[in-house]
Every structure is written in C-alpha cells, then in structure tokens.
Amino acid sequence: MQNIGLTPILFLSCGLFFIGIYGFLTRRNMITMLMAIELILNSVNINFVAFNKFLFADKLDGVFFTLFVITIAAAEAAVAIAIIINLYRSYRSIDVDDADTMKF
C-alpha cells in the first residue's frame, strides 16, 4: 500500500479553499454562499488532519481541532439556514442583491 505524501493533500486543500472563495465572491444566492463557506471550513479541516499526521503523529491536536471546527460549522449552518428561511418567508427572495430593497 502506497502512502500519499503531504504535498497532494495540501494541493487538494488549496483547491477546495479557492473553490470556496470563488463561490463565495461570485454567487449571489445565500444558500450557495453558505455551501462555499462550508468548503472553506472543510479545506481547513483537511489541513489540520494532514499536518497532524505528518508533523505530530503521536498527538491528536489536529483531530481535536477538526472536531471542534465541524461542531462549530454545524451550528453555524443551522443558524444560517434558519435566518435564510426567515428572510425567504418575509421577502420571497434569498438573493443577496435584493438585500438593499429589504426593509428591516
């Protein structure tokens, strides 16, 4: 069985990160922006686990940080979806460009 080095894992993480940044900056739909933020957080999780495996194999600090980030991301997604549903019920749109016409 062949071990994968650190470099391909970091390229994967970098690719996910920049896909997330691109999705966040170019999309106007709040759901798509939320998915882009999740991609960014998952790329950070991959970095935590990869550096933990290759630099500190005897410790589990990277895994614990990853579990913490996953927990925070789940809470963030639940709150964001609740806010998006509330905005859709009130204004019939989840487009970010329509936010200037919404009166809070």
Image: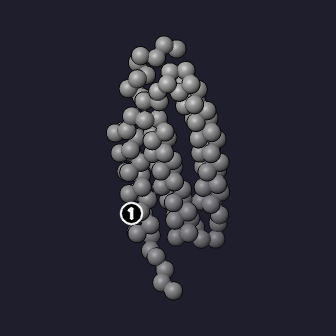
- In depth, the one of 52 and 10 nearer the eye is 10
Label 1 environment density (alpha carbons within 10 Å; few <14, some 14–19, many ≥20): few
**From this viewpoint, is residue 39 visible?**
yes
Q: Is residue 18 left or right of residue 75?
A: left
Q: Residue furthest bottom?
A: 1
Please say if 101 is above or below 69.
above
Q: Which residue is mark 1?
A: 11
x, y percent for residue 25: 36, 38
| Residue at screen point 43% across, 22% down | 99
* Quarter of the rendering containing residue 80: top right
**From this viewpoint, is residue 76 visible?**
no
- In depth, the one of 10 and 78 nearer the eye is 78
| Residue at screen point 38% across, 57% down | 15
x, y percent for residue 67: 64, 54
- In depth, the one of 47 and 84 nearer the eye is 84
Please say if 6 is above or below 32.
below
* Quarter of the rendering containing residue 56: bottom right
| Residue at screen point 48% across, 45% down | 35
Q: Is residue 95 left or right of residue 68?
A: left
**Kind of residue at badge 1:** Phe
Colouring convention used in this rendered image of the protein? one colour
Secondary structure category for the residue under label 1: helix
x, y percent for residue 8: 40, 69
